[in-house]
Amino acid sequence: MTADQVGVHNRLMVPLSLIMLIAFVIRMVAAFFSKGFAFHDDHFDVITIAQHWLYGLPSWLHEPMPPRHSMFYAGIHYGLFYLMESIGITNPDTKMTLVRVLHGLYSLLIVYYGYKITERLSNQANARIVGLMLALMWFMPFMSVRNLVEMVCIPPYLAAFYFMLKQDDRNRNWHYLWAGALFALAFVFRYHAALFLGGAGLVLLYRRQWKDIIWLALGFVLMATLIQGTIDLIFFDYPFHSVVTYFFYNADNAYNYSTGPVYRFLLTILGFMVPPISVYLLLGYSRTARLAPMLFWAGLLFFVVHSLFPNKQERFILPLFPLIMILGVIGWQDFVRTAKFWQRRKKLLAASWAFFWILNIVVAVAMSFTYTKKSRIAPLVYLSEKQDMDAVLLEFGNSSMKQPPLYYLNRLAAEFHEYHFNYKRDWDEYKAGKPLPQDFAMTYSLNGEKSLDSLQTELSLYPYQPDYVIVVGQKDMEERMQRINSLYPALELETTITPSLYDRVLHFLNPRVHKDEHVRIYRVQDQN
């Protein structure tokens, strides 16, 4: 980048070591202060499953068909929890803090490989921009410490591209073998990562690089078989049974989740990467087909497939962002260097970048202190200290009932809900003759659509009766409390939990979707 190349980037003489330090610091802040979970999957299909395995419950394993989530990733957390509890770390908050720290450290590989790939394809100046983007893009620190397979699959696939870009004929076969193995590792975390391999493979096929294709495929098959094939052979019917089941399930249920128009992910990218810079980056990306064909077509294939498929949840597109940053910066900076339009409008371009960096840094720092789903987690953390608790009643008013993250109760617990897996029944079936733990707890739910008679029927099925009532929200409190008091006349308010700033902002912006979730915890008084 020359002195004529605009903006603040003339002064971005930041070494890789400093970029890595910046990325490390903000991720550690997020690890310690950004509690909670972002989406359903990053808690209930990872943390909950791993903890159940630690309790001895065969979650997923009892079912005739494989799960639609990575057993390998859940198994890693099972191993982490086992090690933690073996050395006396049992507090659920402490365990999750350590998990976030490990994810934050692991995510530094995204910054490192993003920088190194950009440096190899372009120059250090562009690599610094990409490195800082990957370190400080507003959602990157926050998402990097979450249990999202969409983020966890990024380091191995970036490392795979780095190996493929190495210009070393003596070790070329080994580079492609390792690249295939790394693509397989990304694949067993998130099956869709195979699209990156597919795009790169098409380029190799077009070039007729048969030897490279063979070594790449060999590395992929060996690693994928070693991990996913072995897991499916042990727990299910045949190797890669999970993969087959996953794609058949998604084909049958393509319209049963969040859907949207074909351009939805395009709008997601434009919004997430902050306009107008997001527009510049997409234009830059479009100019790199010849410079970096394997990365270009890999990213394009990933984007097109996800755009055409009906199920469009924003997190699905997260793995693509590093490629957009890498190729977008390279292509855009090259364009600016020769574009007379931008050479005459350096102040405008500098202002665009200044706005981009200020907004990203401010939001990234704010998100790193964000406690998401606090109203669902903090009450259970509070009750985890109550040794005399047999059961909890969660009352949601006229809002929909939400699945409680029972992991935070720090004991084996079951939710009585017809739509969710009944762990009490599962224990009875698989632990026949063995009594439940003494601190076992049941949870029941109540809202405006559920009658008191239905709740009382549920309560009559088990000896576990509520000792505490959690009342979520503040709307229609008088009417709701009268209804609860008809069951439990003597309630004592123990504590009130306020939503996090993040949850309050969401409620302010969209109160119809994001409810006010102030929480009151009442103790049921003994009436004998």
Image (cartoon, rainbow, N blue to C red):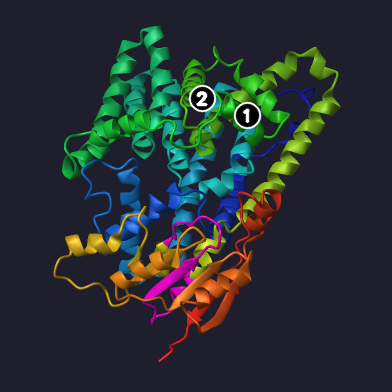
Q: Is residue 424 above or below residue 16?
A: below
Residue under pointer 1: 267
Q: Residue 398 magenta-drawn?
A: yes
Displayed quadrant of residue 243 = top left
The amino acid type of the residue labelled 1 equals: Leu
Residue under pointer 2: 307
The amino acid type of the residue labelled 2 equals: Ser
- Who is closer to the viewer here, 363 or 17? 363
Write the start and end of the magenta stretch as one range. 380-405
Helix, strand or loop for the magenta stretch, by majority: loop
Relative to 59, 199 lies left or right: right
Residue at image point 47% right, 86% down: 525
Give the tally of numbered discs.
Answer: 2
Residue at image point 36% right, 62% down: 416
Residue 204 percent location from the top left of the image = 39, 13
Q: Is residue 71 above or below residue 448?
A: above
Kindly indicate whether the residue at mark 1 contacts the one at mark 2 (C-beta within 8 angstroms). no
Q: Is residue 388 above or below residue 260?
A: below
- Who is closer to the viewer here, 88 or 46? 46
Relative to 265, 408 lies left or right: left
Q: Residue furthest left?
A: 433
Can residue 127 be seen by looking at this rendering? Answer: no
Residue 5 percent location from the top left of the image = 76, 24
- Who is closer to the viewer here, 169 or 419? 419
Residue at image point 49% right, 44% down: 107
